[in-house]
Amino acid sequence: MPPPAPAPPAPLWRADGLIAGALVLLVGVALLLWRRRRNGPSDGDADEVAVAPITAEPRAHRPPSEPASRIAPVPSGPTPASPAVGAPRARLTLALRPRRGGINLVTATLDAELEIVNAGDAPAGAVQVAARLLSAHRDQQAELDALFAEPGVRPAVMPFALAPGEGRVLPLLLTLPRGAIRPIDMGGRAMFVPVAAVDVRYASGAAKAQSAAAFAVGVERDGAAKLAPFWLDGPARMHETLGARPHGEPVMR
């Protein structure tokens, strides 16, 4: 009887299959890692990774001297309607030169010239001049303050303009009803001191401006510093030699 045939060797497919499977797994892991490095993080990691570059990367690349914020500064200074402090502006000065004045049975009359000069360094536009004849009294300043604070004036002449350094002389003929005169008692005699109140409104650039002043008017006398009043108990007459003095607080704004 022939000897039995030797048993066939154990199949190698199991060991080889395990080795091949391990190699395939390693190749798959390596391929996955290579693809993740090439394409960036997957969608599953986005919420966890995306925050860091937004907050960290700009600071890492910002030069030390660069400010943390690039917000543009807000321009400072006034609005165009109001001139900046120290900006050129018009400034009108006023001077009154009486020529004739007196009292009759009906009115007090003052014939004068008003000189307006732009002493500023910008043009004055839309110059409007208003003037009124008043009677001097104890509470005069309150009357002038209220008069010069009125929102508008009734111009005596057509509006005009003045360049820097330019001046203009305007004729004024002012009257006051005799019944509106406030007599001042002086040693038992009644006297009248005319007061010419001048209010000038104008434009300096886009801003509104005002120059206002009052002038007491009287008769000039040789060698006398003070002016003589108009006496109410004398005959009606016109005086030719008159002078004016500043009266009350002027306004310039």
Image (cartoon, grey):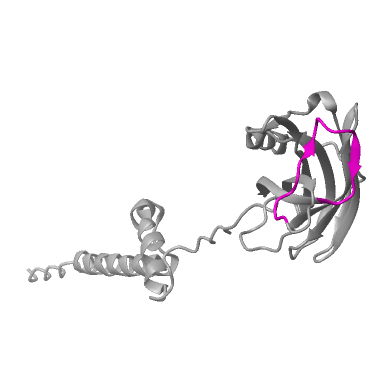
Q: Residue lying furthest top in this view?
A: 179
Residue 36 drawn above or below residue 153: below
Q: Quadrant of residue 48?
A: bottom left
173 horizontally vs 143: left or right: right
Residue 246 drawn above or below residue 20: above
Numbered-mark total: 0
Picture coordinates of residue 149, whole percent (x, y):
69, 37
Residue nearer the viewer, 209 or 221: 221
Q: Residue at x 75, y 34 (%)?
A: 191
- Give the dominant element type of the magenta stretch: helix, strand or loop: loop
Residue nearer the viewer, 60 or 184: 184
Picture coordinates of residue 167, whole percent (x, y):
85, 61
Picture coordinates of residue 124, whole percent (x, y):
80, 56
Evaluate whether residue 207 shows in this view: no
Residue nearer the viewer, 217 or 141: 217
Give yes or no for residue 228 being in the magenta stretch. yes
Q: Residue at x 63, y 32 (%)?
A: 139
Q: Quadrant of residue 24?
A: bottom left
Q: In what quadrant of the picture does the N terminus appear?
A: bottom left
What range is drawn magenta here? 224-242
Evaluate whether residue 86 shows in this view: yes
Q: Residue at x 84, y 56 (%)?
A: 115
Picture coordinates of residue 197, whole percent (x, y):
76, 41
Q: Residue at x 23, y 69 (%)?
A: 19
Q: Quadrant of residue 158?
A: top right
Residue nearer the viewer, 203 or 129: 129
Give yes or no for residue 19 being in the magenta stretch. no
